[in-house]
Image (cartoon, rainbow, N blue to C red):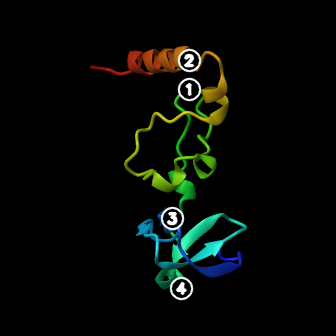
Amino acid sequence: MSEDHWIRLLVKYRGKCAVCGKDIQAGEYALWSRASKAIKHVSCQTQPQKDTSVLELKCFICGKTAGCAQCSYEQDCNRELVSQACICESCLSDKKAYENYQAAFLSKIAKVKI
């Protein structure tokens, strides 16, 4: 995000700072990047950015990346706390998504040693 052009604006909708991960409330001034579709606090402008690439979740069904950056819940998701049972768009759009999820769950539970 350091190469992106950041625009200072008055926030209309609540969001999460791309640097610190804390909420940015409507009515606050913040910096927004059209290129990365990200927002950050004005005070976070000079702070080092946290590496969110490490926090990319894996799809519970296929094991590929879940696509966190493109997820419609991305702004509200705390990947450090969220369930590790997310599903990628490809698996979610499958007509047998629920059955595939059940099969993946049963497969994973069978591997658990008690």
Circle 3 sits in a helix, a strand or a loop, which is it? loop
Q: Residue at left 65%, top 63%?
A: 37
- The residue under label 2 is which amino acid type? Asn
Q: Which residue is mark 4?
A: 46
Q: Residue at left 42%, top 66%?
A: 23
Q: Are marks 1 and 2 in contact (CB under 8 Å)?
A: yes
Label 4: few (<14), some or many (≥20) within 10 Å? few
- The residue under label 4 is which amino acid type? Thr
x, y percentage for residue 99? 54, 14
Please name which of the two marks, 1 or 3, marks the residue nearer to the observer. Answer: 3
Q: Of label 4 and label 3, which has the lower sequence position?
A: 3
Q: Residue at left 44%, top 15%?
A: 106
Q: Are marks 2 and 4 in contact (CB under 8 Å)?
A: no
Q: Which residue is mark 3?
A: 13
Q: Of label 1 and label 2, which has the lower sequence position?
A: 1
Q: Are marks 1 and 4 in contact (CB under 8 Å)?
A: no
Q: Marks 1 and 3, how far apart in space?
A: 33 Å
- The residue under label 3 is which amino acid type? Tyr
Q: Which residue is mark 2?
A: 100
Is 97 situated above or below 35? above
- The residue under label 1 is which amino acid type? Ile
Q: Marks 4 and 3, how far apart in space?
A: 23 Å
x, y percentage for residue 44? 49, 80
Q: Are marks 4 and 3 in contact (CB under 8 Å)?
A: no
Q: Which residue is mark 1?
A: 61
Circle 4 sits in a helix, a strand or a loop, which is it? loop
Circle 1 sits in a helix, a strand or a loop, which is it? loop
Circle 2 sits in a helix, a strand or a loop, which is it? helix
Label 1: few (<14), some or many (≥20) within 10 Å? many
